[in-house]
Image (cartoon, rainbow, N blue to C red):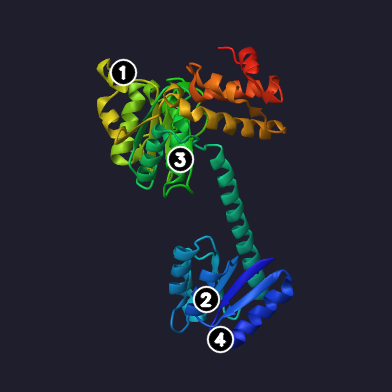
Amino acid sequence: MANILLIEDEAAIRRVLSKILSEENKSYTVTEAVDGLEGIELIKKEDYDLVLCDIKMPKMDGVEVLEAIKKIKPEIPVVMISGHGDLDTAVNTMRLGAFDYISKPPDLNRLLNTVRNALDRKSLVVENKRLKKKVSKNYEMVGDSELIFIIKNIIEKVAPTDARVLITGGNGTGKELVAHWLHEKSHRSSAPFIEVNCAAIPGELIESELFGHVKGSFTGANKDRAGKFEAANGGTIFLDEIGDMSLKAQAKVLRALQENKIQRVGSDKDIKVDVRILAATNKDLKKEISENKFREDLYHRLAVILINVPSLNDRREDIPLLIKHFAAKIAKEHGGTTKEFSDKAVGKLQNYDWTGNIRELRNVVERLIILGSEEISETDVNSFASK
């Protein structure tokens, strides 16, 4: 079922378009509005999958209607209906976000193809939103301790800005979760989020990975290749373990921050990029600076906002919630039922020394679910969660 809103001041054209759409597909429900003001009121009250809107109308013209729709419900595709003299305006509406335009009198095949394509586009947008919500659950920040509350509060304030953030903390504390939250709560959330593990890329390849390269710039460079900065254009790039980046690569990252430009390896051509940079490290960068292993000017560029993610040992009150969260998630992954943990089992896990932080806790919970009893007991913890 597709709900279509037709905004057109000429009654004859409304009748023709409504009849064409209704007869073409019985699943199309067409609602008519006689002018832009009525159309906007209907959009505020009802959900539509597509809007067909005339350009020249009394009270409120089609351009104004389009702009209003994009503010109220930007996901709705809008197809503009243009008269012969409105073609320049119709083309301009494409720049303002219209899906397409059709000319009067409408060509039947063109009209129906445009409608089908617009409805397909709407379905993709809805599906992408659904998938994004699903992805977001993979990066849920679980806990209600004071330390986690402070971090969540900082994220709420910082995410809507383009401020650069340096995330610090030990291995397994969840620094990448903070980065994902910052991106998903930002105005860049619909654009790419590109993650780069600087520690996992050999030093001689990090520049190519980040900035791309041109054919023949080094052995194995068989073709031009875009780097992560270009892939993240318009979105966010997350430089994880930036403390492991070479000084040469650091200099190029600094230039990208200062000038919003990069150069591919082997090229002197500037490429403009618009990216928000988030960085993370488990190292003491001030110590690295004193040992000439990290650039101080880059540090100050990255650390506009500092977020330190606490160790699990510093937020033990969150362990019961984390156990419950991981147990449900693991049960879903394995296709089984969620196992409960006894109070004594939880209490014992709360007293462990979690050197591997949240990552280690998740592994232990998974091991207990696989090997333990129907209800995980203190005995199960003693037997299978050995440290």
Of marks 3 and 2, the one in the foreground: 3
Work out whether residue 78 or residue 266 is closer to the camera in this orientation and state it.
Answer: 78
Q: Which is more N-terminal, label 4 or label 1?
A: 4
User: Residue at the location (44% across, 79% down)?
Assistant: 60
Q: Is residue 263 left or right of residue 171?
A: left
| Marks 1,4: beta carbons within 8 A | no
* Residue 77: x %, y % from top left: 55, 64
Q: Residues within 10 Å of mark 3 (few under 14, many from 20)?
A: some
Q: Which mark is residue 39?
A: 2
Residue ID for mark 1: 293
Identity of the amino acid at label 3? Trp
Q: Is residue 172 above or below residue 270?
A: above
Of marks 4 and 3, the one in the foreground: 3
CA separation in Å, label 2 and label 1: 62 Å
Q: Is residue 51 above or below residue 314?
A: below
Residue ID for mark 4: 10
Quarter of the rendering occupied by the N terminus:
bottom right
CA separation in Å, label 4 and label 2: 14 Å
Of marks 3 and 1, the one in the foreground: 3
Residue ID for mark 3: 181
Identity of the amino acid at label 2? Gly
Q: Secondary structure at mark 3?
A: helix
Q: Which is more N-terminal, label 2 or label 4?
A: 4
User: Residue at the location (35% across, 45% down)?
Assistant: 157
Q: Residues within 10 Å of mark 1 (few under 14, many from 20)?
A: some
